[in-house]
Amino acid sequence: CIPTIRKSIPSPDTTLVGVELCTCYVQSLLEPLFDECQGENETTCQMTENSIISCDVMACDEKEGYCNTEGGGGVCELRELEVDNDEDDDVVNATVIATACNTSNDCFPTMRDRVPSNQDVIGVGSCGCYSDSKIDPFDECQGEEDATCATASCVEDSCMMKEAVCDGDLGVCVLKDVIPDISGIVAGDDDTNATTASTAATAVNANETASFETDSDTMTTDPTKTATVQCTQDAECIPTIRKSIPSPDTTLVGVELC
């Protein structure tokens, strides 16, 4: 059960079922989903993306959806969140950041670098990753001015191995983990003096980047080679800031520190 802002209503000729346009209600991930157009097509159904109407993105603030199982069957219902105002200002509200989308091209993972100071934080906190939309961008300051909206200095990329897609049924951007397929990655030949380091996202063939002297602790490299990592698809490739380099006695392979 997910709090949802209604973005479409049928024409005046049809009796409206549920809440008005731009009002918060609860949607279910299970079939059948509630049809905001109530059976009408795009020609007669009033949609916010096809008009000058702009809904308040905070209409579902401090609300949550829950499954009411009283009486046997489960029904999604909406209720107010209990907010403890005595907690720290940076307490994260349980409300999920829900940005509208038409296709997955509208969505992109974003690391939050701004949070409001005078209200509870909606969604993820500072430096957390969420799914934003190009057509319905989330206001990280939640309406506050720059003077009270804090800016974070994030070090690690919390959106690494994440991707944003559009949930076609709900019409909102959602975040999901990237699970790379590394089944086709082959390490170096056994008869070469190489070391292969692999992670879930990349596999480095050390035979292409460095060789190690067996009779010494000193690492030597081939300066004609560049740091090369293997992949089978774009999702396996991650921009990374280099945070370690070998000693000056070793020829550097690839980019400099930082």
Image: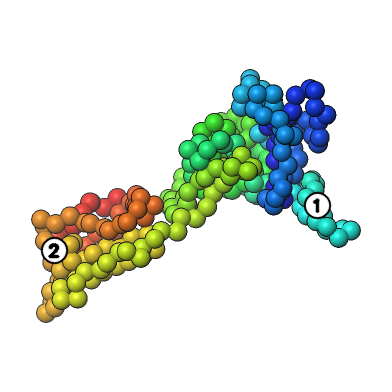
**In the image, residue 5 above or below residue 241:** above
- Residue 33, located in which quarter of the rendered image? top right
Q: Is residue 98 above or below residue 136?
A: below
**Dot 2 and dot 1 residues touching (CB under 8 Å):** no
Does residue 62 appear left or right of residue 89 in this picture? right
Q: Is residue 225 left or right of residue 237?
A: left
Binning the other alpha carbons within 10 Å of mark 2 as few (below 14), some (14 to 19) or many (20 upward) gives some
Tell me which residue sits at (63%, 21%) in the image: 51
Q: Which residue is mark 1?
A: 75
Q: Nearer the viewer, mark 2 or mark 1?
A: 1
Tell me the quarter of the picture where residue 20 sits: top right
Answer whether residue 84 is visible to the viewer in this image. Answer: no
Residue at the far right in the pictured view: 71
Residue 221: mark in rendering: 2
Q: Position of residue 104 (x, y in %)?
A: 50, 41
Number of residues whose C-alpha sits closer than 10 Å to that of mark 1, classed few (under 14), some (14–19) or many (20 or more): some
Expressed as whole percent of the image width and height from the top left, the position of residue 219 reads 16, 69
As helix, strand or loop, the secondary structure at mark 2 comes to loop
For the residues labelled 2 and 1, the Cα–Cα distance comes to: 64 Å
Q: Position of residue 152 (x, y in %)?
A: 50, 43
Name the residue located 15 percent from the left edge and 76 percent from the top edge: 191
The one nearer the camera, 186 or 195, is: 186
Amino acid type of the residue tagged 1 in the rendering: Val
Q: Residue furthest bottom?
A: 215
Write the residue at 17% across / 58% down. 252
Residue 139: x percent and y percent? 58, 34
**What amino acid is labelled 2 in the image?**
Thr
Please indicate, yes or no, whether residue 221 appears anywhere in the rendered image.
Answer: yes
Q: Nearer the viewer, residue 58 or 34?
A: 34
